[in-house]
Image (spheres, rainbow, N blue to C red):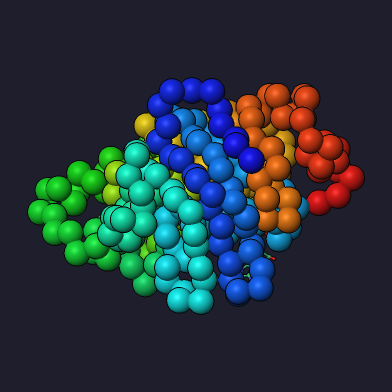
Amino acid sequence: MENSINNDKYILELKDVSVSYNPEKKAIKDVNATIKEHTVTAIMGPSGCGKSTLLRAINRMHDLYPDIKTTGQILLKGENIFDMNPMRVRRLAGMVFQRPNPFPTMSIYDNVLAGYKLNNIGLSKAEKDEVVENSLKSVALWDEVKDSMTQKGSFLSGGQQQRLCIARAIALKPEILLMDEPTSALDPISTNRIEDLILELKQQYTIVIVTHNMSQAARISDNSMFMYLGELIEYGTTKQMFTKPKDKRTEDYLTGVFG
Ligand SMILES: Nc1ncnc2c1ncn2[C@@H]1O[C@H](COP(=O)(O)OP(=O)(O)OP(=O)(O)O)[C@@H](O)[C@H]1O
């Protein structure tokens, strides 16, 4: 099934993407979609439909597990990610997880720079200071932590930790931010702050977010995907999907018949 948003400049193209955890069953099947830059795309669907599996395919996280098989093509700015160095793919497509996961023994400062260390990229002290300050300013955390840079990341509140994790991804100057239910472990105020942040960050980045929260998808996303049993059933503007879903299964999900 061809799913495309009618726009010219695609940062991400998924072509017949399938992922299987075991040879008998595909967790996602032949997903086709194109994503335009500086947009927020929400991936929705009932539990187990393949949302996280799709998100993880986009930065080659499945490569870390030899039994998982991914087929098809994923083009990032026209380049097939399977022809790229996986570390580069993960730098260009940063991931933010459901539970904030700063490295607990590292300082706030070192947490922001963790991706550079993992990628063996050397920076001068002045460059490090600049990356840390800019990244923390981008997530509106700088003023709160600038006097406690040597404190451990785990010393922060859950919402602050999640903003720190977003800063860690942004520090590497990615093209895309992949977010897997980034607010589901947060209180409503922290959730609001992350949603506002996502709307600001889309000026600079392209964001793909898995969410169970339909009102969140309606608030922050430009486009939405609805997945069911491993298939991308519907993909279109969020407005259209919420007001006039094309597929009965999308409508049933959005109206709470299942999910
Ligand atoms: N590591 C794994 N090994 C085997 N099967 C897996 C693994 N991870 C996921 N699956 C299976 O793949 C399918 C898709 O799972 P996935 O986690 O992508 O769904 P999801 O839509 O993100 O679910 P949820 O909303 O509950 O997080 C499910 O049937 C799940 O059981």
Give the x, y percent position of residue 163.
45, 48
- Identify which residue, 186 or 67, lies in the foreground: 67
For the point 17% across and 59% down, the residue is: 121
For the point 34% across and 39% down, the residue is: 78
Give the x, y percent position of residue 114.
30, 61
100 is higher (above) or lower (below) than 132 = below
Quadrant containing the N terminus is top right
- Indicate the quadrant of ligand 1 in the picture: bottom right
For the point 68% across and 50% down, the residue is: 231
196 is higher (above) or lower (below) than 126 = above
- Residue 121 visible here: yes
For the point 64% across and 30% down, the residue is: 236
161 is higher (above) or lower (below) than 41 = below
Left or right: 22 in relation to 109: right
Left or right: 68 in relation to 28: left
Left or right: 218 in relation to 205: right
- Residue 219 visible here: no
Give the x, y percent position of residue 86.
32, 61
